[in-house]
Image (cartoon, grey):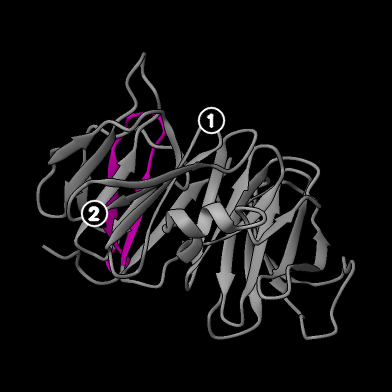
């Protein structure tokens, strides 16, 4: 069963479950228990079902799968290690997880088969994003790497590649908290270093670095304009100009267009009918 349109979806790390509210009426539409997932560890798989990577409890850290119309866990899978970040491709054919060891896992949804696993970072993979056939991974170690999935899914291509990744960005000085991709092969990352950085995925370079008065925990790009929303740990949402073109580079700390105050959530609209809210206090 597909989710109703215009839902707001929230996941809790304290085992309060996964819940969804109707955006127009404010009424609760769905609540799934049990669930204790970190931010960026819940994925809507093409609107068909939810996948939620659980925080480790003892030696167990399963991924829970939920149907939209049934409150209980439908299926559990048990990856080789706790999964910190989880996304699905837009068609819902593949599920991609980032592990606490720095490894990336790539599963086929239909069969549940692990197609490939590779070591990506020295510390936890904290967030993942897709742009066409490029996978962007970001880590607790502050690094961001760009992967060509056509290469990573082919054993011979992986063997022949000079490096497994296309690009490795190390300009963040503290853990990366979120990353989002935009048309034109542009990505925006946020970090505990209180900056958001804008990247060209096609050219492999940083376009801009924007400083904020607080740690930014989540970012989302407005697909209709060149602005993005940065959810701060101070409870504020910063409306920020991207301001990138072919000649952009360097720092620009004067791009905050406005501030939405007194928020306990950073609003992250997805491209489907589901919206994700994550607590940032």
**Callout 1–callout 2 Cβ contact below 8 Å:** no
Per the rendering, the mark at residue 101 is: 1
Q: Secondary structure at mark 1?
A: loop
Q: Is 81 in front, or is 7?
A: 81
Q: Position of residue 65 (x, y in %)?
A: 21, 44
Q: Residue at x 47, y 73 (%)?
A: 132
Quarter of the image where the C terminus is located: top right
- When the figure is inspected, residue 187 is found, relative to residue 223, above or below; the finding is above
Q: Is residue 117 left or right of residue 274?
A: right
Q: Residue at x 18, y 51 (%)?
A: 111
Q: Position of residue 13 (x, y in %)?
A: 41, 33
Q: Residue at x 81, y 52 (%)?
A: 171
Q: Is 226 in front, or is 105?
A: 105
Q: Which residues are magenta?
A: 7-25
Q: Is residue 38 magenta?
A: no
Label 1: how many Cα within 10 Å (few below 14, some 14–19, many 20+):
some
Per the rendering, the mark at residue 275 is: none
Q: Is 29 in front, or is 74?
A: 74
Q: Is residue 10 left or right of residue 250?
A: left
Asked where in the image residue 266 lies, by quadrant, the reply is bottom right
- When the figure is inspected, residue 275 is found, relative to residue 81, above or below; the finding is below
Q: Position of residue 106 (x, y in %)?
A: 38, 49
Q: Is residue 20 magenta?
A: yes
């Amino acid at each position: 069963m597909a989710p109703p349109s215009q839902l707001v979806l929230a996941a809790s790390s304290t085992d309060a479950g996964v819940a969804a509210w109707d955006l127009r009426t404010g009424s609760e539409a769905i609540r799934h228990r049990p669930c204790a997932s970190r931010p960026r560890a819940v994925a809507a798989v093409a609107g068909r079902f939810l996948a939620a990577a659980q925080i480790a409890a003892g030696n167990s850290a399963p991924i829970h799968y939920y149907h939209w119309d049934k409150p209980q866990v439908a299926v559990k899978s048990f990856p080789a290690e706790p999964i910190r970040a989880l996304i699905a491709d837009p068609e819902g054919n593949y599920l991609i997880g980032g592990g606490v060891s720095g490894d990336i896992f790539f599963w086929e949804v239909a069969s549940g088969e692990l197609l490939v696993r590779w070591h990506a970072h020295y510390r936890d993979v904290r967030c993942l994003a897709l742009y066409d056939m490029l996978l962007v991974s970001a880590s607790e170690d502050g690094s961001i790497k760009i992967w060509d999935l056509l290469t990573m899914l082919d054993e011979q291509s992986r063997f022949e590649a000079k490096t497994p990744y296309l690009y490795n960005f190390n300009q963040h000085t503290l853990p990366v908290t979120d990353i989002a991709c935009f048309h034109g092969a542009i990505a925006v990352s946020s970090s505990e270093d209180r900056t958001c950085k804008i990247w060209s995925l096609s050219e492999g370079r940083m376009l801009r670095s924007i400083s904020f008065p607080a740690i930014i925990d989540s970012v989302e790009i407005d697909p209709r304009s060149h602005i993005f929303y940065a959810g701060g740990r101070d409870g504020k949402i910063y409306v920020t100009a991207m301001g990138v073109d072919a000649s952009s580079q360097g720092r620009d700390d004067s791009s905050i267009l406005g501030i939405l105050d007194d928020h306990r959530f950073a609003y992250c609209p997805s491209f489907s009918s589901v919206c994700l809210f994550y607590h940032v206090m």
